Image: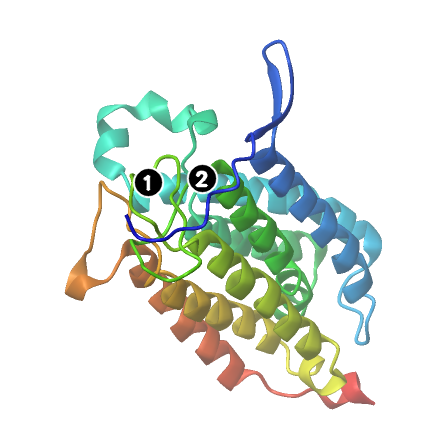
Amino acid sequence: MLFAIPFPVIDPVLVQIGPFAIRWYALAYIAGILGGWWLARRLVALPPVVADRRQIDDFVTWTTLGIILGGRLGYVLFYRPEHYLAHPLDILKVWEGGMSFHGGALGVIVAIFLFCRQERLEPLGFADRVTAVVPIGLCLGRLANFINGELWGRVSDVPWAMVFPTGGPEPRHPSQLYQAGMEGLLLFILLQVLVHQPAIRARRGFVAGAFLAGYGLARFIGEFFRQPDAFLGFLFAGATMGQLLSVPMILVGGWLMLRAKPRQEAVA
């Protein structure tokens, strides 16, 4: 066996009382939504104001539904359509795992446009402020993946490789931590720098585009270290499903940034 750092085994269940259990993964979702809510209430107030705090409070319900429904349906359609076509009731078994970020992203995009239509808000300006907080949840979610010892990386001989409880005897990349750093921390810093620039805020849709392109690029790179799902393996040209789904995000994000036009009243 190659040298490997011992995996820091942490119980995925934080607290359990009888059949009731609080898991780190669920807490990651809750903390990500609450942290994003807190920050988004402040970002929408930056000039030009794109929404009020009451509207952000209301949007929390919309985005939560978008994340859960979109994430679950995305996993069903992108990753295991044959299984769920044969066992449709399994779609409801969310406690068994199976969420797709790309599906969740589509769910939130739909929620943004429907909410903005109802509230008569400008969708791109609103999306700029909302997407700037998403990496909080991404970072916490990847850390929860690490705690659960799931979605581990490919076999490696790097000095920091780990043997995961469910990953066999070979040392592997702790790819969950790579993704937490790229999709979470680095992307969060980039988006905060952008959204706090008045000239960037004047270009409505630029920050949202930077999020889509930035996440897509970070996910594409991270997939080179992550072990593909066993039931999918490598797909077209040796790419993984995560990489194939990230390409449209990069393209759409780049297009949004290129088309974003400055509005002079926002920088006055």
Of callouts 1 and 2, the N-terminal one: 2
Name which residue lies at 22% across and 46% down.
232
The C terminus - image quarter: bottom right
Q: Is residue 250 above or below residue 94?
A: below
Q: Is residue 120 above or below residue 19?
A: below
What's the amino acid at mark 2?
Answer: Gly
Secondary structure beneath disc 1? loop
Q: Indicate the position of residue 101 as horizontal and vertical percent values.
A: 46, 50
Secondary structure beneath disc 2? loop
Q: Dot 1, how many residues are within 10 Å of its Cα: few (below 14), some (14-19), or many (20+)?
A: some
Q: Indicate the position of residue 224 as horizontal and vertical percent values.
A: 32, 63
Name which residue lies at 28% across and 30% down.
84
Q: Indicate the position of residue 233 as horizontal and vertical percent values.
A: 21, 49
Q: Nearer the viewer, residue 67 or 235?
A: 235
Q: Indicate the position of residue 46 as horizontal and vertical percent values.
A: 81, 72
In the drawing, does residue 194 fall left or right of residue 151?
right
Pointer 2 residue:
149
Mark linked to residue 167: 1
Name which residue lies at 61% across and 20% down.
21
